[in-house]
Amino acid sequence: MTPLLGRKSKTVTPLDGVDVLLADLDGVVYAGPGAIPHAIESLNRAAESIRVGYITNNASRTDASVAAHLTELGLTVAPDEVVTSPQAAVRLLADHVPSGSTVLVVGGAGLVDELVKGGYTVTRSAEDSPAAVLQGFAPEVSWTELAEAAYALHPREDGVEIPWIATNTDWTIPQARGIAPGNGTLVSAVHTAVGRLATVAGKPETPIFEEATARFSAKKPLFIGDRLDTDIVGANRAGMDSVLVLTGIDKAKHVLAADKYSRPTFILDDLRQLHEAYPATRMSRDGNEARVGTSVVRIDGNDVVIVRDGDTPIDLLRAACAVIWASGRAIYGFNVPERLYS
């Protein structure tokens, strides 16, 4: 076996050195109304020693209603410990139109609440000549609301196009019954009708992370998410360490294929592993072999080879990710054993 490089050092947990833990909600804390196994007790344990806050792209509810739901699930959460995409969206809106302007809303109570707090007048009709359109997810959003947004966003007779801000563009949202269409599908419907793109406030854009960092005065935050394209990309853009937890949208096959912009700092099966030792990755001198714990994975030509399964499947996945990512090659260039992602 090729010699491996790496210093012997004290094994640490993902939480070591962290002053604020920031958690996504859908797919991390809950799926639909119910808690994800092990999430509540793991977050409560973390809250015994560090601050814990919550970030959500879901624009359908207010921060107070989110905090109430989390408290019902067994956490202790105040409204100001919840950072929402509507909050980030209204802050962005203030850069485009002044307080007191009329804004057309596509979405639910979370958007309306933040607009009212910001001093804006809310309308649901393009006939009210809104100064901007603010769009977010709500289960009750209908074709009629999407059409009103399209009417408002078409250029006016003088050629002026009003601002269009979307809370987020998540393509999917995890629910108790499975994976459902997210706000990205609704934003895309309007985009198709008007031929222009929205400005996005939530993940993976940085405003929502910047608001969370400022609100909690975080010096070394750690963000937990379940999606590579929004959660992990956003955390990387914001310059913070991240956890991908495999309890939501993205699974082993997705993280194996992650590009350089969407690679997490840590990969966990569930949130119990926040409190468990996270083994260091040791690479061989030629960079073609990675060891994590007792798991060893090597690249041999176009083959990803499992040299040693090791003690846990999650360490095997971590080792496979490390060696594939270090290769600089796209996943489709490799023959990958099915048990790495099944």
Image: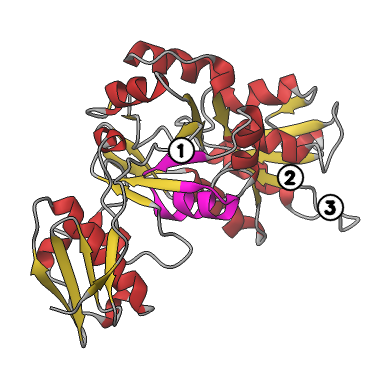
Position of residue 239 measured from the top left corner of the image (x, y, whole percent): 57, 51
Residue at horizontal 17 percent and vertical 59 percent from the top: 316
The residue shown at (77%, 36%) is 127
Q: Nearer the viewer, residue 189 or 100?
A: 100
Residue indicated by mark 1: 17
Q: Which quarter shows the C terminus?
A: bottom left
* Residue 107 coordinates in the image, percent (x, y): 57, 32
On the question of residue 170 being in view, the answer is no
Read off the residue under disc 2: 152
Disc 2 residue type (three-letter): Ala
Circle 1 — which element? Answer: loop
Query: Callout 2 environment at 10 Å: few (<14), some (14 to 19), or many (20+)?
Result: many
Give the Cα separation between the discs numbered 3 and 2: 8 Å
Q: Which residue is mark 3?
A: 156
Q: Secondary structure at mark 2?
A: helix
Q: Nearer the viewer, mark 1 or mark 2?
A: 1
311 horizontally vs 272: left or right: left
- Please report the bounds of the magenta region as a residue range: 221-241
Q: Is residue 331 above or below residue 275?
A: below
| Total count of labels | 3
Label 3 CA crowd tier, 10 Å (few <14, some 14–19, many 20+): few
Residue at mark 1 to residue at mark 2: CA–CA distance: 48 Å
In the rendered structure, which disc, 1 or 2, sits on the residue that comes first in sequence? 1
Residue sticking out furthest to the right: 158
Tell me the element at label 3: loop
